[in-house]
Image (cartoon, helix red, strand yellow):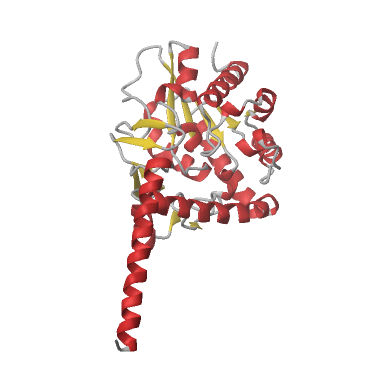
Amino acid sequence: MPPVRRWIRRLLVACAAAFAGLVLAEGALAVFFPQPIYDIYIRDAVRGHRLEASAVRHCRTAEYRVEVRTNALGIRDREIGPKRAGERRLLCLGDSFTHGAQVSRDETFCQVLERSLGEPWEVVNAGIPGYETAHERIFLHNDLWGLEPDAVLVNFYQNDVTGWRVGADGDRLRLLDGNGAFLPAPSWHSRIRNRLCSRSHLYYIVWRALRDAHVWREAPDAQADPEAWSATEGNLRALVEECRAHSIPVGVAVLPWYGRVLQESVDRNDVHRRVPEVCAAIGVPYLDLLPSFLEDGRASLYYRIDGHFAHDGHALAAQEIERFIREQGWVR
């Protein structure tokens, strides 16, 4: 057999073996270690991304199986109609920790809080995975005032500092103004990546590992990077000022990272020191949930692999948030 044909044959055999290996790996992951993939994200020209409205998806991993439903606003809540006479609404802004795709809707801290407060209070879950303060202030300004909230709670997580540079799909974000508003630079490869992430367990786990490595490689720089904290403070200040313009009380809750609670890791972004300083400068009340989570210390507060709140974490967060808003006089 001529050398060229031998090389072609070897190449074809190698490609076939690689393809078979990928198929086997994909199948094994789907059965034994499924990833949290559910195709519910839509690219948005203003916010970068949003959730598909009135959608039903099922999120299944090795740790949980959850049905996720969105309403007409594209948030994980019931359909929200006009306010009834005497009804009060607390609007919760946040990211995937607030959204709570790892537990049933009834187990999210928003719903636990609503049941504990009782009538006339309704707690609206406006958490969107991948959002941070820049997304949240745009979302509030453009879409959420029609809900007529009586109070707004901004749920802050540590990647609200590093996340302003990296979008939910891994794209770098282009800052547009001094307040840190942004639009993602459109790219054909990000659309392909999003499609693969929503369909392939193998691709998702590799992409997530690479993305997290990129984010955490930059994380130590964020605590020393004045621009990162300036963008964060600018967006939070703009959000707070808009609430005040509507005569609506607003507060900030700092949600702790599982590594800080369960593994005694260092607060790499210095969030639990810097956020209180930012809130003091803005003049907005804040709640740091870290002391309560450290005192509790149960491993069941978080999903160990996923890293988000489990049932007990949502329950503890709801308990502490209720105490906070009662202290602020929002609920009497």
Quarter-of-image position of residue 189: bottom left
Figure disc tally: 0
Image-based side of 253 in relation to 242, left or right? right
Q: Is residue 14 shown to the viewer in this render?
A: yes
Residue displayed at 39% across by 47% down: 28
Coordinates of residue 45 in the picture (x, y in percent): 36, 52
Image-based side of 256 in relation to 194, left or right? right
Q: Is residue 140 above or below residue 78?
A: below
Residue at the far front in the pictured view: 1
Residue displayed at 63% across by 49% down: 230
Quadrant (top left/top right/bottom left/bottom right) for the N terminus: bottom left
Coordinates of residue 215 in the picture (x, y in percent): 57, 53
Residue displayed at 39% across by 40% down: 142
Q: Is residue 181 above or below residue 148?
A: below
Q: Nearer the viewer, residue 7 or 307?
A: 7
Coordinates of residue 155 in the picture (x, y in percent): 54, 33
Quadrant (top left/top right/bottom left/bottom right) for the C terminus: top right
Residue at the far bottom in the pictured view: 2
Image-based side of 330 in relation to 29, left or right? right
